[in-house]
Amino acid sequence: MSWTDERIEKLTKMWEGGATASQIAEDLGGVSRNAVIGKAHRLGLKARPSPVKPNEKEAAPAPAPKATKVATEPAQRVPLPPRAPAHRPAPAATAQPATTDAPTPTPQPRVVSVGPGGFLRQGPGDQQAPIPPAPPRRLVPAKPSAEIAEKTSLLDLNDRICRWPMGHPGEPDFHFCGVKVNPGFPYCVEHCGRAYQAQLPRGHRRPPPPMPFGGPRVR
């Protein structure tokens, strides 16, 4: 929008006539209130007086009503009747303690707390006393069978008797040699000769058996 001479003349006339900037902007059209005020200042038009008068004072707030004190009369004291002298009974020769029946306590409801999973939590009074441990049982060795009644069993082995097995495990008469050991060996002299055999010279040894399928596979 451009300011033509006609629009400037109209603005000046309305400004001096006392119209507000909003009214002038509405009458001219296509211009805002701030644009009208800026153009008036650039033209050097007379400034508008402030709508708020400096001599006017803001209305003072009404004073709050004072709280009225309510006179309270002191309460009149009622005279008490004179106390009668207390009558003290004469001391008895043999005073016996008076027996009074104590009131029986009323049973209180038992509160049970339900924990997660639906089980009931135990209170301090619900816990049972720990069960004392059972006395130690005396182990009685089993009676050996008739087949090994006088032979050396596994429970009889020690470092001083021969440990050469006699028979096969699982058989009813399976036992160990039980003869005095050869010093420094776990077997007796007879069984040491069977357990430890001298190695033959290299020339008297048997050749190793042939490998299966004609020997090693060459790639």
Image (spheres, rainbow, N blue to C red):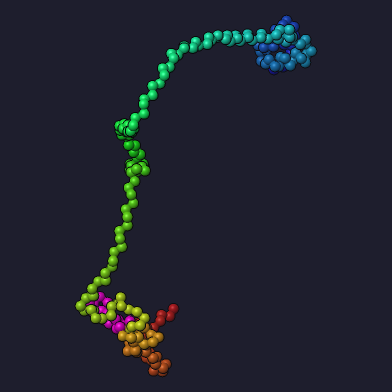
Residue 32 at what x, y percent from top left? 67, 16
Q: Nearer the viewer, residue 104 or 208?
A: 104
The x, y position of residue 102, in whole percent, is 32, 32
* Residue at the front extreme of this rendering: 93
The chief SS type of the magenta part is: loop
The quadrant of the image that shows the C terminus is bottom left
Quarter of the image holding residue 211? bottom left
Can you see residue 13?
no
Residue placed at 43% from the left, 13% from the top?
A: 81
User: Where is residue 163, by image quadrant?
Assistant: bottom left
Q: Position of residue 95 (x, y in %)?
A: 34, 32
Look at the image and tell me in which quarter the N terminus lies.
top right
Write the residue at 26% across / 69% down.
Answer: 140
> For this view, does 193 lie left or right of residue 149?
right
144 is higher (above) or lower (below) than 102: below
- Rendering coords of residue 196 (x, y %): 37, 87
| Left or right: 41, with 114 as reference point | right
Is residue 96 covered in magenta? no
Q: Nearer the viewer, residue 101 or 28?
A: 101
Residue at far right of view: 44
Query: In the image, is 219 to the left or to the right of 177?
Result: right
Residue drawn at (71%, 7%), measured in percent from left and top?
A: 56
The residue drawn where x is 70% and y is 8% is: 57
In this view, the residue farthest toward the left is 146
The answer to if 171 sits in the magenta stretch is: yes
Against 24, residue 89 (above or below) is: below
Q: Quick check: can you spot residue 29?
A: yes
Q: Give the number of callouts.
A: 0
Q: Which residues are magenta?
A: 163-178
